[in-house]
Image (cartoon, grey):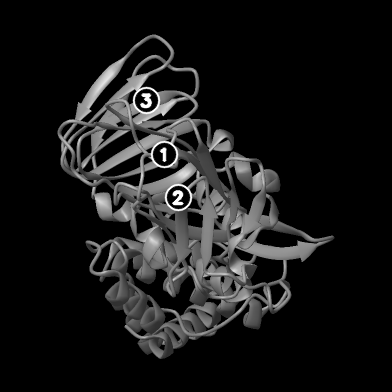
Amino acid sequence: MNFEDDDKIARILANSTMGGADDARRQMLEEWAGKSPANRAVYNDALRGGLTGGLEVDPAREKAAIARKIRRRSIRRTLSWSIPAAAASIALLLMLLPVGRVESVPEGIAPGSRVAILELGDGRQVRLDTLQRPLIEQDGASASLSGQGQLVYLPAEKAQDARITNKLYVPRGGEYRVMLGDGTQVWLNAGSSLEYPLTFDGGERRVRLSGEGYFEVTPNDLMPFIVETGDQVLTVLGTRFNVSAYAEDGVTITTLCEGSVEVEALTGGGQALLVPGQQAQLHNGGAGFTIAAVDAREFTLWKDGVFIFDERGLGQAMQDIARWYDITVDMGDIATHDIVFKGNLPKYEDLDKLLGMIEKIAPARFYMRGGVLHVDMEQ
């Protein structure tokens, strides 16, 4: 069913709630309702007194409410398919969701971009997105900026002091990519940081992550790669994985794409060995891991420009959106509702358009007041 069909059914159903449908139209509604449980639920809700509420039913508002509910159920069923490639996901979504925007949210709130601040070993800070010189030199080592917005550390001509570290900060509303001295590549999400030595020495490669990062680790059997977060230590030899460790989320999530990793809780000493397609969750201050099988791509496509919300709570999704657009979100009373939705959304849309897409697949309404994005239940 396309959106024109949705509008036709919604118009007939709205008229039916006020006794305005003849026998032929009532038969059409019965046949439509019998096609799926979702259709039947919309039909029954409407006949119980309308979806807009109130003692007097406004035909235009009732038709719009019914059409939104039909579209939301249809989209939710369609988006429950397995995830294809990122580009195909976006194409599918844009076919399903006509271009629209939330009128109560100002236009021009742009998505994040490649923004980062590099703190050098001597404490100096360099903003990479405005740096005029493409080469950064320090303590005999050097790093360059590639045309793709990536910081690349060049092999040093002589051994460096492993105690000298750099720290890469990615603010809210940013993302960045770095290639470390051993060839390991790390993608950092908004509101994240990575601390690492100029050169790896001493039998291990140890870095410290805050926020979220996707890692492609260069294999080295003699020098394991170790990622520290606030609550866990992760050890690998060479692999691909994603770690999300935002303090405000209250949980560290490790998702393995390839190879194997061992995770250890800093509190209580709990350990787990992951294989590809597994995910470990450790709640802040917890001693043990929860292990589950997942589609690892759902937790890594953020680096390729796609938000993946697979049965995610609306509150969790809004945390990701708040970091990416660098905004403050007030969930209000809706935070107490267990609203779960599923869909793939493009990260590089302006905020008003992205929220317009979400309104079509979740029972939520958005508006901006005093610089804060407010979220309410759909009425």
Is disc 1 in contact with disc 2, using a CB cutoff of under 8 Å?
Answer: yes
Look at the picture and state if 322 lies above or below 217: below
Percent x, y of residue 339 = 50, 49
Q: Sequence-wise, which precedes: disc 3 or disc 2?
A: 2
What kind of element bears circle 2? Answer: strand
In this rendered view, identify the residue nearer to me: 27 or 54: 54
Dot 2: within a 10 Å radius of its alpha carbon, few (fewer than 14), some, or many (20 or more) residues? some
What kind of element bears circle 1? Answer: loop
Q: Sequence-wise, which precedes: disc 1 or disc 2?
A: 2
Q: Amino acid at mark 2?
A: Ala
What kind of element bears circle 3? Answer: strand
Look at the picture and state if 10 lies above or below 255: below
Taking the image as drawn, is residue 331 in sight? yes
Q: CA distance from mark 3 to mark 1?
A: 25 Å
**Residue pictured at 64% horizontal, 63% vertical:** 365
Taking the image as drawn, is residue 343 in sight? no
Q: Which mark is residue 160?
A: 1
Percent x, y of residue 216 = 28, 50
Q: CA distance from mark 3 to mark 2?
A: 28 Å
Mark 3 or 1: in front is 1
Quarter of the figure with the N terminus: bottom left
In the picture of the structure, the residue carrying the numbered disc 3 is 233
Q: Amino acid at mark 1?
A: Gln
Q: Amino acid at mark 3?
A: Val
Q: Sequence-wise, which precedes: disc 3 or disc 1?
A: 1
Q: CA distance from mark 1 to mark 2?
A: 7 Å
**Residue pictured at 56% horizontal, 43% vertical:** 337
| Res 76 → quadrant | bottom left
Q: Which mark is residue 141?
A: 2
Residue 275 shown left or right of residue 140 in the figure? left
